[in-house]
Amino acid sequence: MISPADMLQARILIVDDQEANVSLLEQMLRNAGYVSIASTRNPYEVCELHRMNRYGLILLDLEMPGMDGFQVMEGLKEIETDGYLPVLVITAQPGHKLRALKAGAKDFVSKPFDLAEVLLRVHNMLEVRLLHLEIKRLFDQLVVDDALLQNEFSERKQIEEALHRTQAQLSLHAGQLEEQVAERTSELAATNKELEASVSFIRKANEENQALFFESNIMRGQLSQLTRQIIMAQEDLRKEISHELHDGVVQTLIGINIELSALRKGAVVDVHTMKKIGYTQRLVEKSVIEVHRFARELRPAVLDDLGLIPALHAYIKSLAEREKVKIQMTAFGGVEALGDDERTVLFRVAQEALTNVARHARATEIKMNISKISGAIRMEISDNGRSFLVEKIVSAKNPKRLGLVGMKERVEMVGGSLTIESERGKGTTVRVEIPFIVKEIPV
């Protein structure tokens, strides 16, 4: 687990061309107890500094002369090959926030600074980053332990084969040894002792293998727990950002549009200016639509307010319109009796599966069915698109596996199971089953 001391000792880099901003952020972080803080006003130095120091968090100003924050993030992507950029962007331009998140930043703060907000976002990002690094460390250790375990099994197999060969040779020469029993008694006794030592060694190796296997299972459990914590933290962060977009950005854009409408009606302006105002209003309206869409993809408010089925209908409608694909959905109404966590899991799995189909499968038709089976809720998503080799995609060396791994982790968090079937000419089916037990009310 990540301790408070780990958080305070994490390496932080401040990147801003304004000396006053750098000084303010450094002082604020040191007052909060952070001890490993570096800074630069030259954006060209950031990538090399990160390559040498691997910062847990980079506070990055987007507007700098010569090289802006978006170019810096492109350079950081070549260093962070796993795709995770520990970047908290700083901007005074509201329009840059969504662009920064799409470019790979994990969060943002606005100028002028709200120090309490900055400290909270720094703490949250460091916690997620350190958990991410801890998971990677545990996974690498698990790979090493698994290699050691395989080596132990190989040695044991060699010993057993040697024992079998020795026993076969003894049986082959049994008839020839009758006349030499007396002479060879001492030699056989020595051989028996060697065999006993071999058996003892095998028993000891087996015990050690069992201990290693037990330890490996514990580490797998810890890795799974850390992954689930990250998923929960990501879900909370998605919800928070979605609410901020709804309550902050959208309201601001609507306010701008109202002001433009009032200006258009009340002011005496020429035709050219009226056209400019109208064009600006259309841009603001388009921005409101885009922010709404982005907020819905992060965490649709309808999921919390109305339930799973309305949320899926809204997402499917939006996806079908964007990707020009036919999506048919049938659902068992009783699914709304599931808890919040279970309904969130079903929504996220559906979102990930439908997005994968839209991006990669080249499907023209998708069918989703949510039904009740014995003791469980089953959700199936099938398409008529291109198939793929499931085992190859989910292998440990394939970077595209992370989305499928995230789906599996989410489902297992609520005690469910996930299977994927893909066959050439028949498309792909994603199947999720989550326990659903209706408690009977005593009469």
Image (tube, helix red, strand yellow):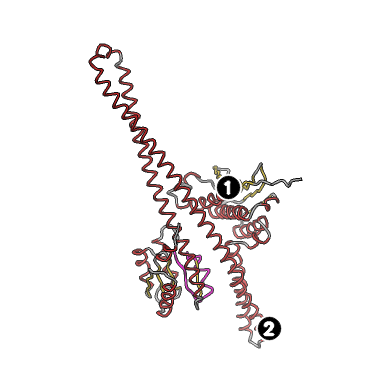
Q: Dot 1, crowdedness within 10 Å: few (<14), some or many (≥20)?
A: few
Q: Is residue 387 visible?
A: yes
* 1 or 2: mark nearer the eye: 1
Above or below, 371 relative to 21: above
Q: Position of residue 431 (x, y in %)?
A: 59, 46
Left or right: residue 38 compared with residue 439:
left
What secondary structure is found at the residue carrying circle 2? Answer: helix
Spot the residue most to the bottom.
Answer: 268
Above or below, 363 relative to 117: above
Q: Position of residue 390 (x, y in %)?
A: 50, 45
Pick the quarter of the image with the N terminus: bottom left
Q: Is residue 103 visible?
A: no
Residue at 49 percent across and 72 percent down: it is 118
Residue at 39 percent across and 75 percent down: it is 66
Q: Nearer the viewer, residue 442 or 88?
A: 442
What secondary structure is found at the residue carrying circle 1? Answer: loop
What residue would you read off at disc 2?
265
Q: Dot 2, crowdedness within 10 Å: few (<14), some or many (≥20)?
A: few
Left or right: residue 181 compared with residue 27:
left
Q: What segment carries the magenta color?
A: 85-106
What residue would you read off at disc 1?
415
**Looking at numbered disc 2 in the image, what kind of residue is underneath it?**
Lys
Spot the residue most to the top.
Answer: 179
- The question of residue 23 being in magenta is answered with no
Left or right: residue 111 compared with residue 317:
left
Pick the quarter of the image with the C terminus: top right
Query: Which numbered circle lies on residue 361?
Result: none
Q: Position of residue 147 (x, y in %)?
A: 37, 43
**Looking at numbered disc 1 in the image, what kind of residue is underneath it?**
Gly
Residue at 55 percent across and 52 percent down: it is 410
Q: Position of residue 54 (x, y in %)?
A: 37, 63
